Amino acid sequence: MDHPDMVVPFAEFAARHGAARLWLGQSLSVDTHLVAAYLAGRGLRVPLGTGVTLLPLRHPYQAAVEARSLAVLTRQPYVAGFGAGDPEFVENLVGRPYRSARGAVGEYLSAVRDLLDGRPVRRRGAEFSVTGMLPPMAAHPPVEVGAGVLRPRMARTAGEVCDVAITWLAPAAYLGEVLTPALLAGAAGRARPPRVASIVHVALDRPGRDIARLVRLSTAGHLDSPHYRDMFRLAGVRIDGAAPERELVASGAFLTGKAEEIAAGLRRFHEAGAGEVVLNACGVLASEGAPAALADLSEIMSALSD
């Protein structure tokens, strides 16, 4: 993203179609939170979520300040989603990888949640230390705290500390059979378990489109990451063969076909436990630009409403 204006058509689309939320990923070009503030300044006050921003980029206290600030600026509920990031990325920023990604996420999100709830925090963890509390403010829209979840152990941690578990490239069957039970196990004893927001890659199968290329553009960098590879192993998706793109489509990790077929695939995520399904057309966006991505999203939304 070279300028926040690139996001404006998608915010306008979300507002026009009554989407539950506009989700933003981590941007290291123009910071995600500043993009969200820019949209609010433009008058585009749609509910927002981040899926996900990376822990080593900001202290938990600053993360809580930013999350609350966006709820105030947008005047809408906000989902502050966080992820640990690749070990190499963590080491480059903090000097070493986290001893445990699960432990780091648990410490971080627990502190952010307590700060947002107005509680004084006094924590000295293995990765993060926080002492203090946020200054009291007048009532504002709620902020949910979420964690990126790929595997059952992180799902269990999310169940313990989160409001939202955010999946990415996880097939619906894997969500229902593996992640949801682990999430519920982690949430045992809580008043209610976290809800699930599944980010699902989509592209209509239009004449002349190279779907395999769109899959590659959507998953660039992820298929080489050890934790994604392990998730696909657990899900029974063979990505080590000659055609990993075909496997991702066959598993439902990437949905393609006619709009009605994609809508049916999205409903399977709801059946598997997702309370919110996020349409990600980044492959089409990267290949054909924003108008083509928005055209796909419009047809899929229409099919869903039908």
Image: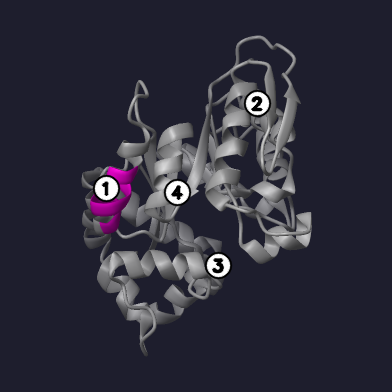
- Ranked by sequence position, the earlier of labels 1 and 4 is 4
Q: Is residue 108 visible?
A: yes
Circle 2 crowding by C-alpha within 10 Å: few under 14, some 14–19, many from 20: many
Q: Main secondary structure of the magenta part?
A: helix
In this rendering, the label closer to the viewer, 2 or 4: 4
- Ranked by sequence position, the earlier of labels 1 and 3 is 3
Q: Nearer the viewer, residue 215 or 133?
A: 133
Residue under numbered circle 1? 304
In this rendering, the label closer to the viewer, 3 or 2: 2
Residue 181 falls within the magenta-colored stretch: yes
Task: Please state the horizontal and vertical placement of residue 265, each as a whole percent of the image.
Answer: 24, 57
Circle 1 crowding by C-alpha within 10 Å: few under 14, some 14–19, many from 20: some
The residue positioned 32% from the left and 55% from the top of the image is 300
Are the residues at dot 3 and dot 2 in contact (C-beta closer than 8 Å)? no
- Real-space Cα separation, disc 3 to disc 4, in angstroms: 34 Å
- Using the rendered view, name the quadrant where residue 121 is placed: top right
In this rendering, the label closer to the viewer, 1 or 4: 4
- Real-space Cα separation, disc 3 to disc 2, in angstroms: 32 Å
Magenta region: 174-182
- Real-space Cα separation, disc 1 to disc 4, in angstroms: 31 Å
| Marking on residue 289 | 3
Q: Secondary structure at mark 2?
A: helix
